[in-house]
Amino acid sequence: TEKIYQDKLLTDIKPGESIKTRATIIKTFDPRYFEVCPECGKRAIEEECKLHGKISPQKRAVLTIIIDDGSDSIKASLFSQEIKLLGLRDEEIFSIEEFNKIKERFLGEEKIFMGNIKNNALYNTIDFAIEKIETPDLDLLIKELEAKSN
């Protein structure tokens, strides 16, 4: 079954919701890297998994961005597969030098972001874990706005 995302403005979100919002990327941070177990996908420390012992870990990345939908802004996280939805290749994701060459191109881009709203207990903030990204269909958007104004 397909996951349902509610269309919401960022001012109306609550932890635990799965939302869809059209927003603009206003800031990007450098990706952070970590290693995971190839069998279970859990975090590996010094080539060791708590469940599977000594392993050959896989490298993963997390990218933090700030998005704004006109009502509010929020910190959003994208993991390795979701980062690729922005059009990045592995070489651009896993090399800070390569990432720094292209990170400015995302600023000001408007996308439709879908994912889960989570409570970050460590920083007492609300975060957006992005699962899907789409490019807005401008023709469809114009029709929707025209329908609302009539």
Image (cartoon, rainbow, N blue to C red):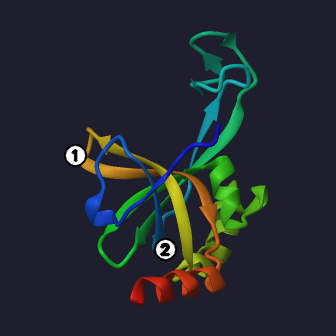
In this view, the residue in front, 137 or 10, is 137
The amino acid at mark 1 is Asn
Write down the quadrant of residue 40 in the picture.
top right
Q: Which mark is residue 78?
A: none
Q: Residue at x 46, y 73 (%)?
A: 23
In this view, the residue in front, 63 or 142, is 142
Q: Residues within 10 Å of mark 1 (few under 14, many from 20)?
A: few
Q: Is residue 109 above or below residue 51?
A: below
Q: Is residue 148 above or below residue 77?
A: below
Question: In the shown orientation, is residue 118 left or right of residue 124?
Answer: right
Residue 17 x/y as whole percent: 38, 45
The amino acid at mark 2 is Ile
Question: In the shown orientation, is residue 44 left or right of residue 11?
Answer: right
Image quarter of the C terminus: bottom left
Secondary structure beneath dot 1 equals loop
Q: Is residue 129 above or below residue 35?
A: below
In this view, the residue in front, 150 or 85, is 150
Pointer 1 residue: 124
Question: In the shown orientation, is residue 25 left or right of residue 104?
Answer: left
Q: Residue furthest front?
A: 150
Residue 57 x/y as whole percent: 71, 28
**Marks 1 and 2, Cα distance to the nearest angstrom?**
22 Å
Secondary structure beneath dot 2 equals strand
Pointer 2 residue: 25
